[in-house]
Image: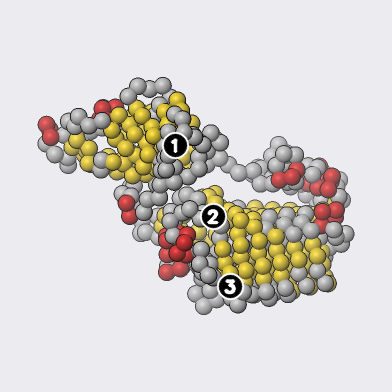
Amino acid sequence: MFGSKSYLLTLTSGVILILILSLSLPASALNTQEENVFAPGSPENPYKIRDWYELDEVRYELDASYELVNDLNEGTHGYDEFVDTGKGWKPLGNSSAGFTGCFDGNHHIIQDIYINRSDGWCVGLFGYSQGDIKNIGLEEVDVTGDWYVGGLVGVNRGEVKDSYSTGEVTGVGYDVGGLIGLNYGDVERSYSAADVTGNGYRVGGLIGNHNFADVVDTYASGTVEGIFQVGGLIGWNHWGSVSNSYARGAVSGGGNIGGLIGQNWRGYVANSFWDIETSGIDSSAGGTGKNTEEMKDVATFTDTDTEGLEWAWDFVGYPGDEDIWDIDEGINDGYPFFPREDHAVEVWVRIDPSTLNLRSNGNWVTAYIDLTDIDVNTVTLGYDEEKVSAVWGDEQDVMMVKFHMSEVQDMLEPGEVELIIEGNTTEGTDFFGYDTIRVIDPGRGRAR
């Protein structure tokens, strides 16, 4: 954080940055960033989700496409109205009207999901999904339901890819999983670190009840407690396929307990492992048990001489085209993990004045940016191929970036112009945001 003192960022005269964190701007305050010929909500032009209000809107158009453009948490607009209530978040979709669209999280994170519906079926961020869900992380979930309970999806009949959950998931009834409760769809490159508790059957660290679909490149690391059919990764595997997956969380229950799979009925389990030490379980209805040292050794997953390994997993630095997995003693407690590509975070931006006079003798052009709890290295304002850079910052209540007006005027020409704010945090995350303003020059006639 900046603290109370000013920070020198980039030595460029005439540009001043004042940082005041935690501004929240309504989506309606932002101008449309660019014209799109495709219908809103189509795969080519997905609806943008920036706050809890817009996330809640998903339930009213369950067959549309959506794109999360920033992280959501308890400080984001709408949390008090839609999450911090008696029963908490109302899951998106149910068995009568499931989600059939596409939800792309863009590798953003939704934090602090709270659901307290111990009498509810199909409970999770999504209650019932037949669509595609991808690239979303759920952190510090607190989810309670009856049957079909998962951190991300209660019942999944679609696809889930590149997604994860952490926190706590509890089910009063059956089919409870850290990510998915009841599953009939393909799941790839996903994991759960949530602690899972089920007071019935079919309880798993990742999936409670898995049927007729493929689970590939997944893992679970949270504790798992249940009554019957309890597994570190999957509680009950019914005609399902599981490969290139592992589990390491402690597992406990009354019967049919497995370090990886609790019970397997005509399912296929291959090339998968569990930690016999951390799980406290030396048996499983599928997979191969390894000690902790072996689970943290890349050779366990890449050397086909390893017992239980039929083909090598695709690790960074080893044969394979996708680099799905990586291993580092300082990450994920030394166990295999999914490397994430660096990505720029899109943020809300509003620029004032919304109409800029090129003949004005004013001092400042101000950009409001929706970021919270960050340390900033650089911030720039750009148009076309030109940019001006900020030189110092001061932290107070909201993020407000001031640029010297004459510097900005020199870049612009009359008309509707789209400006871009770009920056970089001290943690290495890039961020950007757009706003469109009207530029006039009375000496040349008003803007088009």
Residue 258 lies in quadrant: bottom right
Image quadrant holding the C terminus, namely top left
Q: Would you say 448 lies left or right of 234 here?
A: left
Residue 330 percent coordinates (x, y): 72, 39
Residue, disc 3: 117
CA gap between label 1 and label 2 equals: 25 Å
Closer to the camera: disc 3 or disc 1?
A: 1
Judging depth in this view, the residue of 105 and 172 nearest the camera is 172
Marks 2, 3: nearer the viewer: 3
Q: Which mark is residue 395?
A: 1
Q: Name the residue under label 2.
A: 110
* Type of amino acid at the residue the image marks with label 2: Ile
Most distant residue in the front direction: 4
Disc 1, SS:
loop
Q: Residue 84: give x, y in percent of width and height.
A: 51, 63
In the rendered structure, which amino acid carries the disc numbered 3? Arg
Which circle's residue, 3 or 1, is located before the other in the chain?
Answer: 3
Q: Are marks 3 and 1 in contact (CB under 8 Å)?
A: no
Distance (Cα) linking label 2 and label 3: 19 Å
Q: Reply above or below: 174 against 366.
A: below
Q: Which residue is drawn at 40% across and 47% down?
A: 23
